[in-house]
Amino acid sequence: NLPDFVVAVPARYASQRLPGKPLRKIAGVPMIVRVCQRALAAGAREVVVATDDARIADALDGNGVEVVMTRADHASGTDRLAELARLRAWQEDLIVVNLQGDEPQAPVSGIQAVAQALAASYAPMATLATPIQSIDELFDPNCVKLVRRSNGNALYFSRAPIPWARDAMAANRDALPSSVPYLRHIGIYAYRAGFLGRFALLPRTPLEIAESLEQLRALEHGHAIHVAMAPEFFPAGVDTEADLARVERELLASQAR
């Protein structure tokens, strides 16, 4: 059974690598609209886009989602959603799924799974992981790795290969050790609405700054993050022109089937 949840999509116009990213079109439809279509299909109580740009609000007009204008000076999407939760006066225990505005291929099952993971946990936030498939992925700093406790809560996230299988790596650095369940982090989160505001007030931490991973702030301050396994493949988001072209190719190919 699905819990009661909302999907909140932080969307800012000014992207360094892909200016105007939310409004870039994929097969004729703005990316932010495609993201919201995935969120609506997941069965959320409501889908709300938090943005600082009227052009994004205009693009969403008539698409069945609500738009809330937020400040332009937020350091992260989480900070933007903390303002959104305050403006919407959401109840403390409401489940808020943070779906990034550059995830036009986010599977409906994944959006539902992260909401279900939080509902079944005592942690104030939850996220997803998937098995790492190759040694190249393990050593790629853009692929964020994680390790979990026996109860499924996160122990640590890192851009480095963790855990380090000492003996297996000493024997062969070119093959993924089969003895270790290596996990890749998928950047979709669910939070209790009340925790969003508290998280945004926490000072940045040394490990967060070193790894450039915002979720480490929660761990360093002693807050649990529950990690569930993604129920299906979760395609990468859109950061570059090449990503945009790939997503359009894959979308058109799926429509042609």
Image (cartoon, rainbow, N blue to C red):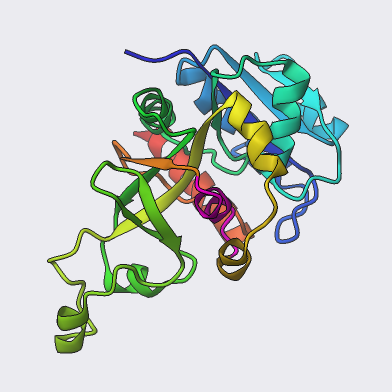
Residue 237 colored in magenta in the image = no
Whether 110 is drawn above or below 141: the answer is above
Rendered image quadrant of residue 54: top right
Whether 90 is drawn above or below 197: the answer is above
Q: What segment is highlighted magenta in the picture?
A: 212-222
Residue 219 colored in magenta in the image = yes
Between 197 and 67, the one lying in front of the other is 197
Q: Position of residue 249 (x, y in %)?
A: 48, 48
Whether 5 is drawn above or below 59: the answer is above
Is residue 114 in view? yes
Is residue 29 in view? no
94 to the left or right of 202? left
Q: Position of residue 107 (x, y in %)?
A: 41, 34
Kindly identify the residue that appears in the image at 70 percent across and 52 percent down: 203
37 to the left or right of 24? left
Whether 11 is drawn above or below 116: the answer is below
127 to the left or right of 179? right
218 to the left or right of 81? left
Rendered image quadrant of residue 7: top right
Q: Position of residue 176 (x, y in %)?
A: 21, 72
Kindly identify the residue that appears in the image at 29 percent across and 43 percent down: 152
